[in-house]
Amino acid sequence: MLESISFTHQAYSKLGSVQRTVQCELEGLRKMLQLQEQAAATLGTPPAPPMLPLGPHANAVDNQDWDVIQEPSRLQLQRHVKDPVDPATARCEAMLQQAERSADVLYETLEFESKELAHVRETMDMKWRDIARTLADEIRQLKKVVADKDTVVEQLRQELRHTHQLALAHEEDLVTRSNATLRRNEELQKLSASAHETNQMLMAQVQTLRQTLETQRATASEQRDKDEEWQGMLAEQNRQLQIQLSHESQAKAELQAMLASVIQQHAPPPPPTAVRAITVSAPKPHKHFPSVITASTPHLLPRLAGGPAGASSGAAKPIPSSTASCVPLWK
C-alpha cells in the first residue's frame, strides 16, 4: 500500500512538472507571436516564423499528429482565404491547440488521479483510524501496565525505605554493640593485666612455696634418713633386749626350778591321817593377803634366793609373776 502511494505521488509530481513546463513554453510562444505581430505592424513586414520549442518536449512536439494542420477545416480555409496567414503562424497555432489538448488530457488524468488519491486517502484514513484505535487500545493497556508497574515501584520504594530504616537501626545497634564490645575489651584488657600481675605474684609465691617445699622435702628426707638410722638402732637395741630377755627368761626358769626344789625341801611333812595334794596355781588375789612377793617384802627375798648366799650378796631381785604364782600362801 505504501509503495502504491509513493508511486502515485511520483506520478503526480511528474505530471505537475510536465504541465508547468508546457505552460511556460506556451507563454513564451504567445509572447513571441505578440512581439512579431507588433514588429510587423510597425515595420510593415511579414512576421518571422516562430522558433520551435527547445528542451525535453521538442521531440514530442515534432512527433505530434499534424493531421489537423495538414487537413484544415472549412472555417480555417475561409479564414485563410480572407486573411492569408503565414504557415509558421499556423504551425504555432496548431502547436498551441495541441498543447491545450494535451493540457486537457493532463487535467482529466489529474482529476482521475485525484479521485483515486481521494479514495486512497479515505482508505488510508480508515486504516489510520483502525491503527489509531489499535494504538489507543495499546496505549491504554500500556498505561494500565505502567500504572501497575508504578504501583509495584511504589511498593518497592516503600519496602526499600523500610529496609533502609531497618538497616540504619541495625547499623545503630551494631555501633552500640561495637562500643559496648570495645568497653568490654578494655575492661577485659584491664582484667587481663591485673590477672597477669596476679599470676606473676602467684608464680612468685609458687616459686617460693616450691623452694620451701624443696627445702622441707630435703629436710624430711634427712629426717627420714635419721629416723631410719634411729629405727635401725632401736631395732638393734630391741634385738639385744630380746636376747637379754631370753637370757633372763632362762634364768627365771632356772630360778623357778630352784625355788620349787627349795620349797619342796623346806615344806612341813603332811599329817599322817590325811594326805593333801598341793597344787601350785595362781590363786585369786586377796585384799588382805597379797599373792605375789614383790619388792615390798624385802626380808623374804634372801631366804627365797638361796639362804645365806642370797643374804650375803644383798641383791634384792624381784620374783617374777610366774614364780610368785607357784608359791603357796600360809595363814
Image: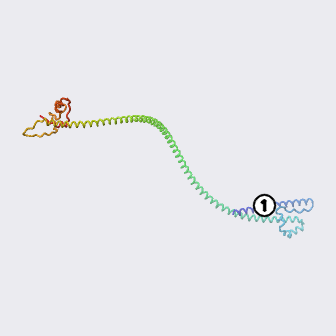
Q: Position of residue 329 (x, y in %)?
A: 14, 35
**Residue underneath mark 1:** 17
Which residue appears at 78% of the width and 61% of the height?
A: 17
Callout 1: SS: helix
Specify the quadrant that holds the N terminus. bottom right
Q: Choose between 32 and 321: the one closer to the eye.
A: 321
Q: Choose between 84 and 217: the one closer to the eye.
A: 217
Corner quadrant of residue 203 = top left
Q: Position of residue 209 (x, y in %)?
A: 41, 35
Corner quadrant of residue 4 = bottom right
Amino acid, disc 1? Ser
Q: Choose between 54 and 182: the one closer to the eye.
A: 182
Q: Residues within 10 Å of mark 1 (few under 14, many from 20)?
A: few
The extreme front residue here reads 309
Q: Is residue 277 left or right of residue 198?
A: left
In the displayed structure, would residue 92 be above or below residue 187? Answer: below
